[in-house]
Image (cartoon, grey):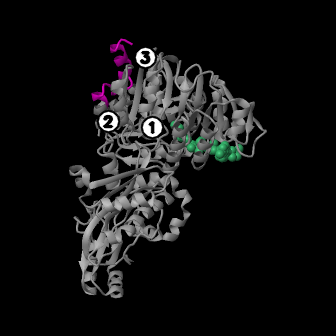
Amino acid sequence: MAILCDKNSKVMVQGITGGAGKFHTERMIGYGTNIVGGVTPGKGGQVVCERPVFDTVAECVKATSADVSVIFLPAQFVKEAAIEAIRSGIKFVVVIPEHIPIHDMLYVREEAIKHGTTVIGGNTAGLITPGEANLGIMPDIAFQPGKVGTVSRSASITYYVADTLTRTGYGETSCIGLGGDPVLGSTFAEILLKFEEDEKTKAVVMCGEIGGVYEELAAEVIPSMKTPVLAMIGGVHAPMGKRMGHAGAIVEGKMGTALDKLNMLDKAGAHPCKTFLDIPDTLKKLGI
Amino acid sequence: MRLYEFEGKQLFKKFKIPVMESRLASNPDDVYNAFSEFNIPVVLKSQVLTGGRGKAGGIQFAEGANEARTKATELFKLTIKDFPVEKVLIEPKIEIKQEYYIGITIDRAKYKLVVIASGEGGVDIEETAEKSPDKIVKFPISINEDLYTFDALLIAKKIGIPQELIKQGASIIQNLLKMFKAYDAKLAEINPLVLTSDGKLIAADARVSLDDDATFRHKDLAELNVEHRHEEGEMTEREKQATEWGIPYLDLDGNIGMFPGGAGFGIMGNDFIHHFGGKPANFMDSGGGPSPERIANMLVLLEENPNVKVICGARFGGISRCDDFAKGVLMFLNNHGLTKPMVFRMTGNMWQEGVRLFEEAKAADPDMFKQIEFHGIETPIEEITKRAVEIAQEVGT
Ligand SMILES: CC(C)(COP(=O)(O)OP(=O)(O)OC[C@H]1O[C@@H](n2cnc3c(N)ncnc32)[C@H](O)[C@@H]1OP(=O)(O)O)[C@@H](O)C(=O)NCCC(=O)NCCS
């Protein structure tokens, strides 16, 4: 089992004819991901990596029954592309590009909620369910099928955590990049609850970092979870970021420092880890 | 991108939010001349990208042209929280009867815009929010929706805008939201919105921050005299150089030069260095999919930083490929040369090709690699950071 995507998912690529789109489609197929087609407006009828290209997502879905989409487009096209995917019935959208305008992500999120679609990113490495599907840009070498789920804000941290779990024989069920942009398609809390429902996932490692609000939201759901959560937060020694005016302080309160986040997660029942090597140690202590 | 008050007020004007007529001055003589145009008591406001300028003496009043010039001379000598005063805004002084607060921001946890309003505006608004939250109105609104007039009227009423100005108050709130959406703002504040003693509503200050990732679609900002800026705050020479090269970079006070991949390990790696008893000299982030040139430039920043005693590198190829990483490192070694010890780990997408490039270069010129310890996936990243701390301690300061 896995969350959000497995070997049976039918995956399409938006921007399949682009530079990064083509390169990573080839890699994803090489990994065994069930890529069924792609979309680039104006290039319908072409074939890329032996997969059909369509002008619109609706046509691609009709012809291939795609239910997952990976977006490889420059940031300014993401709002349209994601909303197109959501309205065409795609249930899981992965937004790889970085620097997506914040307001655009708010529109995408409204649409996703309305249609019951899960969006991850922007600025995510994607998702990998080892041995089954690799969506995005994650390097295969770090991953191995196993029993721990991971979710993190940063791509490189996802790789290091998996690299550690793989080296110590735990392996992973699914690894999800939440994304590094300021407003994200999904929250830690939402992804944690999906792992909670996955029988194969024996523990979840969540890696957050200084700034933002998503780690704090996770603390609200962890107490209700049976699956243990291990937490790492980057930026304990980082210089404090800038404040966003009075309004930011009134709305987001004192959220944001790495230590505060870690303390909050600790109190909620998560197991804090300082380095990646603490992860296998903690799992062992938990009898996993 | 944070806007200066005078830039924010340009946007206000465009959206029919009432502001005083004003002049912008870059030296005391400008101020003198501007005063003559008004010829009534004025306020001189330092234009700096930070709060607390009032408390720092950055706001002065003048009743005559000479007084205005003398006071401006002092203002132009001021530095407020590292921001030197380079521009001063001159406006007729207003008689304040009441100060309101109107702000809009994004609640990232709820994915909504939030209109915030209070009948007790001014510099202590955050304290008010904390001590008497009942004095703050928060109205969440989804990005797809406009603020209806009836909602805006209710907000204006709740904060005590007088009956005869209630419609104007409501439209100020609605227009601020229109501006917020039209310009991809992250923050827009009118603090204070002043009720003058002769019964007018005036936006006495403007604090606006726009989303840097959306300025590409607001080309008209230049026509409104809003110049494009990168970040708020003062930068060191190295930080400026890095910004020019498109590299997020911060100078810190340690001696281990951090040469990470993405921002994630850029942040976490610095924690690891501390964890093992060392101190990083910088924070850096290569960004997604850096070109070999950018990789080389990252190393130039560290090589030329005299505080750096050892370079600690990490590349886990994802969107950034190991072959590009290797090309960048080799470009640096060939064109610039390395005088410092360097330890790094490289794995991930295209690692085989990366390793091949290094092996080939090393076979051709073993000397070039004398100072370099190179690891792959078999070595945990903790070992790399630990090793960097050890080398820094051996080399000493
Ligand atoms: C995503 C990213 C890699 C795309 O860059 P790219 O490959 O150079 O983009 P290209 O311009 O080559 O490709 C875009 C393609 O999409 C097409 N396109 C445009 N709008 C489209 C739409 N709505 N739907 C589908 N395709 C569309 C374009 O026509 C183009 O195809 P073409 O080259 O055949 O004409 C880049 O924008 C980016 O954000 N990079 C950083 C990502 C990152 O770091 N992520 C985090 C990792 S941890």
Q: In this view, does A139 lie to the left or right of B159?
A: right
Q: In which quarter of the image is ligand 1?
A: top right
Q: How crowded is mark 3: few (under 14 residues within 10 Å), some or many (20 or more)?
A: many
Q: Is residue A46 left or right of residue A144?
A: right
* Figure quadrant of the C terminus of chain A: top left
The stretch of residues the image draws in magenta is A265-288
**Image height of B200 relative to A254, above or below:** below
Q: Which residue type carries mark 1?
A: Pro
Q: Which residue in the protein does label 3 denote?
A: A202
Between residue B364 and residue B9, name the one nearer to us: B9
> How far is the residue under mark 3 from the one under mark 2?
23 Å
| Chain containing mark 1 | B
Please tell me how many numbered marks the rendered image carries: 3
Q: Can residue A32 be seen in this view?
A: yes
User: Which residue, as the protein is rendered here, is positioned at the far right?
Assistant: A45
Residue B275 covered by magenta stretch: no
Q: Which residue is drawn at 36% across and 57% down?
A: B233
Q: How crowded is mark 1: few (under 14 residues within 10 Å), some or many (20 or more)?
A: many
